Image (cartoon, rainbow, N blue to C red):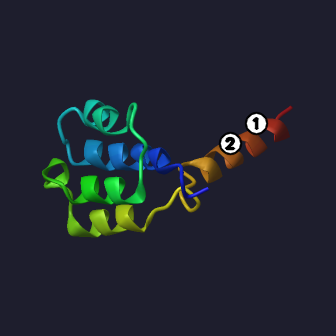
Amino acid sequence: MNQAQEVLAEPIQTVMRRYRVENPYEKLKALTRGNAMTREAMLTFVESDELSAVSDADKERLRALTPATYIGNAAEQARAIKEWISKL
């Protein structure tokens, strides 16, 4: 499960947008498309100048993420589905 490092592009892009980093999608696309992503490559990107505007605390949270631990907004979606089903 931890081999799919490209899954972490989503939270990295979200943090980049929060800090108003220019062209986050394009930067991550350049990093991930057509490349075999490794843990080292993702960690190097988090430490790169591309994320210089990002706080150390947010970088630490990104470094701690793994494909196995990242759930995105799954909990929020599950609650929304549960609520939607209860209205049927």
Question: Alpha-carbon neighbours of circle 1 within 10 Å: few (<14), some, or many (≥20)?
Answer: few
Left or right: 28 as drawn, with respect to 20: right
**Residue 78: x %, y % from top left:** 70, 47
Q: Are marks 1 and 2 in contact (CB under 8 Å)?
A: yes
The disc at residue 5 is none
* Residue 25, quarter of picture: top left
Q: Residue at x 25, y 36 (%)?
A: 27
The kind of residue tagged 1 is: Trp
**Residue 60: x %, y % from top left:** 32, 69
Q: Residue at x 19, y 42 (%)?
A: 21
Image quarter where the C terminus lies is top right
Count of picture labels:
2
Pointer 2 residue: 80
Image quarter where the N terminus lies is bottom right
Q: Nearer the viewer, residue 8 or 75?
A: 8
**Residue 67: x %, y % from top left:** 53, 56
Question: Spatial distance from mark 1 to mark 2, Cα to Cα?
Answer: 6 Å
Tell me the SS state at disc 2.
helix
The kind of residue tagged 2 is: Ala
Q: Residue at x 30, y 63 (%)?
A: 58
Pointer 1 residue: 84
Tell me the SS state at disc 1.
helix
Q: Residue at x 37, y 38 (%)?
A: 32
**Residue 23: x %, y % from top left:** 22, 32
Left or right: 76 as drawn, with respect to 8: right
